[in-house]
Image: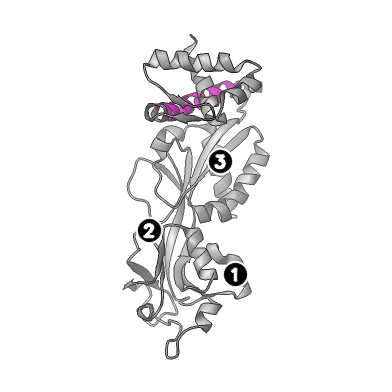
């Protein structure tokens, strides 16, 4: 058995989701492809795929092996591509992770341009508002928002946004008599706060005073917040705000068109929280030409 070839076949089967798709691409038979994967399982002494008549699923051992095998196969393909015409030819899969809102609104337009410039590259975009272990999930590059904890990841700062207090104009119009839009963070005690639980600020929001605030610049306020809706999804926060359900504390890019039109209002423009945006990648992936090219392209696009 050619172990490397069997590993490549296994990776393609998992990515394609079927033996038949790989067989068609390889101009082979489904039986031949299945036998190669079975031979790899015998060699490893572990079952990698759970097969049914309609679908394939990775076993627990298969998930662990797949992430390592996929990375190795990609590195070999990249090394071979670098010999073509004596220069680097970017090709193969690049696995990119980001939060749902940032990935949809900010990263995807840039990714489209990168793919147009490098047609041999395919993007596997993983969007999640939860924490993703890059090494465990086989991620090549991720966009991380906020201060980075100490880690072994290679980081490159590509921008900064401000988290601000926002509300839909319908929410402000519907406030009970005697309740006014907040003019200071302490006023949030009177308001229904849509709480995003994907950060460390689920029970209290942290504000920093700007030049026009009533307190000295740089003054920090941590204000307890409460409301009748909390979520770990930025898309749910967006939907709730647009439905006039309450106030939120979120990056303004989540509502750029609505802020421009006046539909969504900034409530405390002199109180906000600056947060950096970084691209990060595992140490071992930083040597990849695809990863470096992607980080360079995204950084230049976002700065522009």
Numbered label attached to residue 226: none
Asked whether residue 18 is in view, the answer is yes
Image quadrant where residue 202 sits: bottom left
| Residue at (61% x, 20% y) in the render | 23
| Residue at the disc numbered 1 | 258
How far across and how far down the image is residue 251, in percent? 48, 63
Q: CA distance from mark 2 to mark 1?
A: 24 Å
Which residue is identified by label 2?
199
Residue 252 visible in this rendered orientation of the protein: no
Q: Mark 3 — residue? A: 294
Give the magenta range: 65-83
Circle 2 or circle 3, nearest the eye: 2
Residue 260: image x %, image y %?
A: 61, 71
Q: Are marks 3 and 1 in contact (CB under 8 Å)?
A: no
Give above or below for 230 relative to 154: below
Queried whether the magenta region covers residue 74, the answer comes back as yes
Q: Which sits earlier in the primary sequence, circle 2 or circle 1?
A: 2
Q: Residue 138 versus residue 179: which sits nearer the camera?
A: 179
Expressed as whole percent of the image width and height from the top left, the position of residue 227 reads: 38, 72
Secondary structure beneath label 2: loop
> Which residue lies at the image location 53% right of the left edge and 62% below the top edge?
254
Graded by Cα atoms within 10 Å as few (under 14), some (14 to 19) or many (20 or more), the crowding at tag 1 reads: some
Does the magenta portion include 78?
yes
* Mark with earlier residue (2, 3): 2
């Amino acid at each position: 058995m050619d172990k490397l070839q069997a590993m490549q076949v296994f990776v393609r089967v998992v990515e394609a989701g079927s033996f038949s798709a790989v067989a068609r691409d390889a101009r082979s038979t489904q039986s031949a492809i299945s036998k190669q994967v079975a031979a790899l399982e015998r060699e490893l002494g572990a079952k990698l795929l759970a097969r049914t008549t309609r679908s394939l699923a990775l076993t627990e051992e298969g998930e662990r092996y797949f992430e390592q095998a996929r990375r190795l196969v990609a590195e070999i393909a990249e090394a071979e591509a670098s010999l073509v015409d004596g220069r680097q030819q970017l090709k193969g899969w690049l696995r990119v992770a980001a939060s749902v809102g940032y990935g949809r609104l900010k990263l995807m337009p840039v990714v489209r341009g990168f793919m147009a410039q490098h047609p041999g590259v395919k993007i596997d975009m993983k969007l999640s508002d939860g924490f993703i272990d890059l090494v465990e999930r086989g991620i090549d590059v991720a966009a991380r928002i906020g201060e980075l904890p100490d880690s072994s990841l290679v980081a490159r700062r590509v921008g900064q946004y401000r988290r601000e207090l926002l509300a839909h104009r319908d929410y402000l119009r519907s406030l009970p008599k005697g309740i006014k839009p907040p003019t200071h963070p302490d006023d949030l005690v009177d308001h229904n706060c849509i709480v995003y639980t994907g950060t460390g600020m689920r029970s209290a929001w942290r504000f920093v005073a700007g030049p026009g605030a009533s307190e000295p610049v740089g003054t920090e306020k941590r204000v307890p917040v409460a409301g009748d809706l909390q979520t770990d999804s930025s898309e749910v926060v967006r939907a709730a705000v647009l439905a006039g359900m309450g106030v939120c504390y979120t990056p303004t890019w989540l509502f750029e068109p609505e802020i421009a039109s006046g539909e969504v209002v900034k409530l405390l423009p002199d109180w906000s929280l600056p947060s950096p945006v970084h691209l990060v990648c595992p140490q071992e992936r930083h040597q990849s030409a695809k990863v470096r090219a992607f980080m360079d392209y995204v950084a230049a696009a976002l700065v522009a």
